[in-house]
Amino acid sequence: MTNLLIDTLQLKERGVISLIGAGGKTSLMFRLAKELADSGKNVLTTTTTKIFMPNPDESPVTIIEADVDVLIKKSKSYLAHYHHFSACSERDSTTGKLNGFALNTITKLWMAGIFDWIIVEADGAKRKPLKATDTHEPVVPSVSTHLIHITGLDAVGKSLDDKHVHRARIFSNNTGLGLGKPIDE
């Protein structure tokens, strides 16, 4: 018997899931999207920060569109063929990353009523397993119905430094654990 995360998390009818923290947000986002889409739900994966372009195994299509009204029209068309796809506002030509949407855009996408689920990566961590938030983070839409915080267990035993922790100095100040000390709790 396969245990689905959507069952464990009791993700039933509709909602907006915001993922925050470090160490697995992107993987979790696409895993939840696959499970929800496989159950017949229409799912949008997106961000309010920045993400790398999804590969086809993660998302069959990625729409890059800054105009929310145009995006809603395109989404209706894509939903005729796909239960899941990703969208972002633009692609940064320097980094190749996809820039996310403003909070009011996520609200408009949700209020359009065309998605059963919107999954938002609402926090950045520079691909590190642990992080401390800055004053402008996380960027969580007010329409979120679920908030999931992720922490990478692979940080345990590593040293508290910039190699393993996004914003290590802030993390040290917040926790009292000295820079360079092993993360053991």
Image (spheres, rainbow, N blue to C red):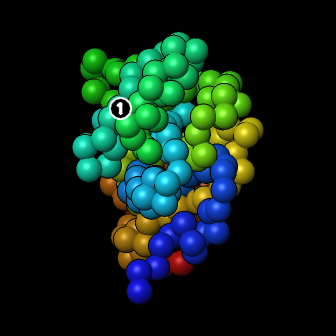
Farthest residue to the right: give it: 142
- Taking the spot 49% from the left edge, 54% from the top edge, the residue there is 40
Q: Judge whether 128 appears above or below 62 on screen.
A: below
Quadrant position of the N terminus in the picture: bottom left
Q: Judge whether 34 appears above or below 90 on screen.
A: below
Rendered location of residue 16, percent (x, y) = 64, 46
Tell me the kind of residue under disc 1: Thr
Rendered location of residue 160, percent (x, y) = 43, 63
* Residue 179 in sight in this render: no
- Crowding at dot 1, Cα within 10 Å, few <14 / some 14-19 / many 20+, comes out as some
- Taking the spot 49% from the left edge, 60% from the top edge, the residue there is 39
Q: Which residue is mark 1?
A: 62
Q: Judge whether 7 appears above or below 169 on screen.
A: below
- Taking depth in this image into account, of 147 and 152 the one nearest to the observer is 147
**Left or right: 53 in relation to 84:** left
Secondary structure under the numbered disc 1 in the rendered image: strand
Rendered location of residue 77, percent (x, y) = 44, 26
* Residue 105 in sight in this render: yes
- Taking the spot 66% from the left edge, 28% from the top edge, the residue there is 112
Farthest residue to the front: give it: 80
**Left or right: 155 in relation to 67:** left
- Taking the spot 52% from the left edge, 19% from the top edge, the residue there is 73
Rendered location of residue 123, percent (x, y) = 53, 44
- Taking depth in this image into account, of 11 and 50 the one nearest to the observer is 11
